[in-house]
Image (cartoon, helix red, strand yellow):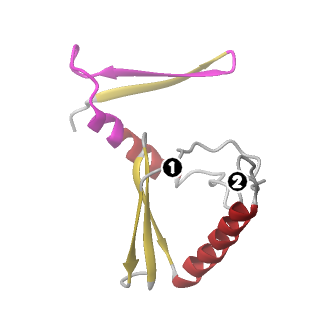
Amino acid sequence: MNPLLTVTLSEENGQSRLDCTMATPGQPLAAGHVDSLIQALARLRQTLEPEVRPDSPEGQNVMGAVDPRWFIQRDGTTTDGAVLMVRHPGIGWMAYALPLESLKHLHVVMGEIIQQADLAPPGSSTLN
């Protein structure tokens, strides 16, 4: 195995710091290197305790993107529902296989939110 990048996570005074060193001095850090690191860290995170919070993230600071690109297509091979893909500008495309029952529930909830938004005065928010 040929190391491309060394990453060090350190903490000082409650602040986290991430340092990256390329194996070849002067070689620029490429987006592909970061993509590989993100994927490896995500696979590692799935194995650690405590698990990522399974319930609603209400009240939790969650990294997100405003009006992300998305794509959805029917998925008859694994869930008999659909695969929803959402693009985060830093992480990339994430795919979620939604079984038919989950897809129906999402449809109902989105319909309720749209209905609330249509009834709300302009500029107000009906979301908690």
Q: Position of residue 22 (x, y in %)?
A: 28, 22
- Which of the 4 image quadrants contains residue 11? top right
- Going by the numbered disc 2, the residue's amino acid type is Pro
**Split into 4 quadrants, where in the image is the N terminus?**
top left
Q: Is residue 55 visible?
A: no
Name the residue beneath numbered marker 2.
57
Query: Residue at image x 75%, y 49%?
Result: 124
Tell whether 82 sits left or right of 59: left
Q: Position of residue 86 (x, y in %)?
A: 45, 57
- Nearer-N-terminus badge (1/2): 2
Label at residue 110: none
Query: Residue at image x 42%, y 71%?
Result: 83
Q: Position of residue 95 (x, y in %)?
A: 42, 62
Mark 1 crowdedness (10 Å alpha carbons): few <14, some 14-19, many ≥20 = few
Q: Considering only vertical position in the picture, is 102 above or below 60?
A: below
Residue 14: say if magenta.
yes
Observer-nearest of 1 and 81: 81
Query: Residue at image x 34%, y 41%?
Result: 35
Name the residue beneath numbered marker 1.
67
